[in-house]
Amino acid sequence: MKTFRIKLAIVGIFIFLLPLMVLGQSFLLQDLPTDKKKLGFRYLRPDFKGDDGLSFLSGVYDFSVSIPVGSNMNFEASLPFVTIGSSGCNGGTCNDTESSIGNIYIGVRHRLKSTAEKGTSIALGVFLPTTPEDKFSTVMMGWYADYYEFQKFFPNTLTIYGNVSHHLIKENGLMFNMEIGPNLSIPSGDNDGETELFAHYGLSAGYRTHGIVFKVELAGLAIVTEEAEHFGDRFTHFLVFGVQWNRGSIRPGLFYKLYLNEGWRESLNGVFGIKLDVILDKENK
């Protein structure tokens, strides 16, 4: 009951802030696409409770690119890479390291009519089934690190992804954005499962001052068609706190993600993240 009240209070805070918020760089949710070429990088490292025995560099490395193709369209692609190594390496050699790529994403994002204060975009793409089916440990690491985007690490599964996002931008530095969309998972290869529908959604609030963005994001993943023992088991929620530099061509950031579900918190304190955006075109100051 106490946990429910805490979650309800968090949701209430976000609802209260809705009229006040505006745009900025996101950590878990989608960024608003621009007419600039951009390279993106994220490193996500699960913060397990107790001694996990993993090397410092174990985690998810997520590489992405966004390229304008026309006046209001962006081509987008991403490549997740997962590695797991032991912290107890002998003589500098780690024989038990395991690594694999995840599911490669390719898609497009259409920028609808926007102004200086608001913008809306619609994305459609597909996650190709490129995750190796024999890398169970890297799949689990991917889910622990980034379960909001679990489709990036599901072997023998092709996922059709859709997303609608709306960003609000105010001159006083306040920021808000929201998103929602479906994830349709289709079995492929040796996967004899069924096609399942999931939904992702999120809200974020932030403040930008002197080129620095402070942001809080509340995101969720819902099971729509797959069976669940209890209704509450259909939902997984995440809370993210982060800060990012938002000027120039190189834009680094740090964030920390909390799982709000008790089952995840039994083994995880949270997820530590690093983000880096590189703007390839000349940016107006």
Image (cartoon, rainbow, N blue to C red):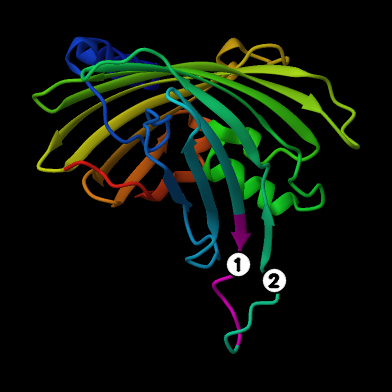
Binning the other alpha carbons within 10 Å of mark 2 as few (below 14), some (14 to 19) or many (20 upward) gives few
Residue 83 is covered by the magenta coloring: yes
Residue segment shown in magenta: 82-90
Q: Which mark is residue 11?
A: none
Residue at the image position 63 percent from the left and 35 percent from the top: 106
Task: Name the quadrant of the C terminus.
Answer: top left
Give SS at disc 1.
loop
Give SS at disc 2.
loop
Q: Nearer the viewer, residue 180 or 258?
A: 180
Distance (Cα) linking label 2 and label 1: 6 Å
Residue 150 is covered by the magenta coloring: no
Furthest toward the bottom, the residue is 91
Give the vertical position of 25 relative to 23 (above or below): below
Q: Nearer the viewer, residue 197 or 163?
A: 163
Residue 28 on image: x %, y %: 42, 34
Residue 108 on image: x %, y %: 56, 27
Residue 19 on image: x %, y %: 20, 10
Q: Which mark is residue 85?
A: 1
Residue at the image position 52 percent from the left and 68 percent from the top: 55
Q: Is residue 184 left or right of residue 237?
A: right
Residue at the image position 45 percent from the left and 49 percent from the top: 42
Q: Is residue 118 left or right of residue 121?
A: left
Binning the other alpha carbons within 10 Å of mark 1 as few (below 14), some (14 to 19) or many (20 upward) gives some
Q: Is residue 89 left or right of residue 258?
A: right
Task: Say if mark 2 contacts mark 1, CB within 8 Å.
Answer: yes
Tell me, yes or no, if residue 267 can be seen here. no
What residue does disc 2 label? 96
Furthest toward the front, the residue is 70
Amino acid type at mark 2 = Asp
